Amino acid sequence: MLTSEEIHPDHQGPGKDPFKHSLSRIGRLTGAARLEDGAVTLYGDNANLAIVPVAAGILRLKVFFGENAPDLGTTPAILPLAGPGDSALTEDEEAYTIDSPGLRAVAVKSPFSLKVYDDRGGLLANLLGIEWNEKRSQTALLAMDDRSHFYGLGEKTGFLDKKGERYEMWNSDVYAPHVPDIEALYQSIPWSIHFRYGLPAYGVLLDNPGRTAFDMRTRADRYQISAEKGALDLYIVQGPTLKDVVRHLTALTGRTPLPPKWAVGYQQSRYSYMSQEEVLKVARTFREKKIPCDVLYLDIHYMDEYRVFTWDPVAFPRPHEMMRELEALGFNLVPIVDPGVKKDPSYGPYREGVQNGYFCRKLEGDIFIGPVWPGPSAFPDFTDDGAAAWWGDLHVHYASHGIKGIWNDMNEPSVFNESKTMDLDVVHANNGDPRTHGELHNLYGMLMSKATQEGMKRHLNGERPFVLTRAGYAGIQRYATVWTGDNRAYWEHLAMSIPMVLNLGLSGVAFAGPDIGGFSHHTTGELLARWTQAGAFTPFCRNHSAIDTIRQEPWLFGEKVEDICRSYIGLRYRLMPTLYSLFYEASESGLPIVRPLLMEYPDDANVYNLCDQFLFGPDLLIAPILRPGTFSRAVYLPAGVWIDYWTGERHEGGRWILADAPLATMPMYVRAGGILAEQPLAMYADDATAQSEPITLTVYAGGDGQFRLYEDDGRTYAYEQGAYRLREFNWSEQNGAGKLRCQTAHDGLPHESQKEDSDANADKQTLRIVVRQLSSAPAQAIASGATLQEWTYDAATRQLYAVVEGAAGNFELRLF
Ligand code: GLC
């Protein structure tokens, strides 16, 4: 524990700025040359800069020293992009100008500075200079001003807007309470978005997996992006909107693939379910109590003395039998797999790893051994494709039991030693380009998840695997879902989980969530109820708690809390067609599933740091209760009309309202014009009851709106071959008449008549349509392109109900 001694005057060093002394700068630009693929090199007095148009709207800037050509290799974070084609280099007395599709860079010669403009002439990044100290720790200085706000930064504590903060990127296992002072957590995504009202937004990614820092605090007029060691390798990512910035970022670092639908469901964990019998009891209780749940987790106690790829022979004597019962109940099981392999010559994975040279080693050849749960352990070198493939294939141990999901933990890597991680002088093989652990630290966790995902994929016969990870780097979304590590059952952590998940989404990680209820410390019924309400809307939805805490399954806090958990988890399942469609959107465009209001309302100055409420997709506003004993709250409704999800009450936006929130109610609002797709309540994602009835599309009248409904088998990769259906619905109103138009972009699912067993699956050609809050009673409803089987209007609730058949193609429903 830290005491006041920590701030003893004698302990204060020169501060955190490593660049105080002996700084060097690029100086004057003395020449320029063209490289291949439209890249340009600018030569300076003291260093050079490679400028590479990577794709339309993405410009790479890499500092390099000496006379050799720049090394334009990248880390695995960066996808190989085709490149935007050519660029033009022009020179005048003052500056060099590099034009590439979407972007213009103007580099002033003396002293060096560089501005990046978008294709409308809007100023994006204003790079005031680059500095380095005698150890070649480099810093980029970028202009900011009073209007600046910062987002992204991956998984960080604090509020949504990161202005005035400084963060380090160094994957760290932080069990200490996560507080705003903590500069580094488990994930490192060296990425910030610079947002100013009225100006185009842009982002900067630093592709360096060593220790790096983003400092929006120290200087008033500039922010600093630094790399302690290795390259200052920056990607300037164009906007102009926040959505565009995230689209471009995820073109560069990849997108969240469609998960299996079961992984989108509610999940229950505990450190640890101690035996096979206990796991089954929890599973049966969920079903008895009719609380929907898709996944149970096995924490470290399922293993034989924490040896990964084993079962404890006493506590889990018949895993196959356990799996069969779980399957019959509709559960998936996700076991934890840590990277530490117990040092035990009689244990297969350790022996094989040693014999084949798969473990991380020092230059002198010694295997790095560090203590973790199993005691002294070796760590696979995932930077080597051979080791990664070996590790991936070890997962056949799980896949052969029918396990489809793996939980990667401790993969910063966390080591129970003084430095808390692997020795920095370990030399990773890195596929023939050896690098120290210090240089590659932040990549370790991501490469573990990559090996895991690829291995599982090889052994799942065409089913989609699910991987959950604690550590990651830019691009982690391609391989794994992220949970935000060891939070606590504090109300403050419930509140903090929202900006954390929102900023992860703005950093490319659409599929993320916290431990619902809080991991360590002891939850209360009230906290669990409120956290489950909010958690029902975070993309990843798992209740998890630590070994020494009060148990946290939803039924342990009395009937009222149980009912609340049941109904909000149930709501998640009813909204599954909406949620799954948002996952589709994330996989396609990188847009996050949950969004800060700023993303949809970028002109509204009230929302730049608003993070006690959020949007689920574009139109559903979620306003959770984040404090105990609180039964109402202020909710900000942006411009437009908003409809209370529960009561149907209409509110003019552009103002705060006071919402009622008794314990059983979390305030939720739908934008007028918004469309939500719902299905019948299901106990798990593949529950046949969910498929037994048509999807209901609810339109909230009073404005125009759009929604894309995506459907596929939720399990396999058949969608890659076209086995999916994508329909775009547009709702518009004119002179009291409403029109719902469906355009089917793709219809690759079998129609009812083509199915062998027509009872087993929903007739997806039938849609139920509900229009809420119609301004006047329609005299007529007419469908074209599909059959309007029935329609009714309830004047009391101002609600129209219609059933449309043959709704798989293009059709229109008109109300007038
Ligand atoms: C770490 C994980 C936590 C897990 C525990 C035991 O603390 O973050 O989720 O339960 O290890 O495996």
Image (tube, grey):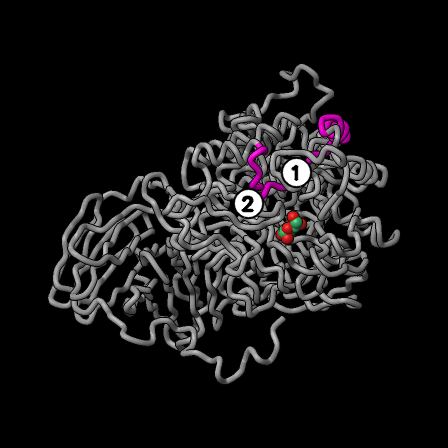
Among the 4 quarters of the image, the one containing residue 630: bottom right
The residue at 27%/64% (across/down) is 115
Dot 1, crowdedness within 10 Å: few (<14), some or many (≥20)?
Answer: many
Residue 458: x %, y % from top left: 52, 27
The circle on residue 334 is 1
Residue type highlighted by circle 2: Ser
Q: Is residue 764 left or right of residue 449?
A: right
- Distance from label 2 to label 1 (Cα)? 23 Å
Q: Position of residue 813 (x, y in %)?
A: 63, 36
- At horizontal 50% and vertical 45% (from top left) the residue drawn is 477
**Span shown in magenta:** 319-347
The part of the image, by quadrant, that contains residue 757 is top right
Give the camera-side residue of 213 and 254. Answer: 213
Q: Is mark 1 within 8 Å of ligand 1?
A: no
- Left-right relation of 788 to 224: right
**In the image, residue 345 above or below residue 675:** above
How busy is the neighbourhood of tag 2: few (under 14 within 10 Å), some, or many (20 plus)? many
Q: Is residue 557 left or right of residue 424?
A: right
Q: Of the residues tagged 2 and 1, which is closer to the observer?
A: 2
Residue 155 showing in the rendered view:
no
Q: At which x and y percent is residue 155? A: 53, 57
In the picture of the structure, the residue carrying the numbered disc 2 is 377
What secondary structure is marked by label 2? strand
Q: Amino acid at mark 1?
A: Val
- Is residue 340 in the magenta section? yes
Q: Position of residue 590 (x, y in %)?
A: 48, 46
Indicate left or right for 500 with 103 as reference. right
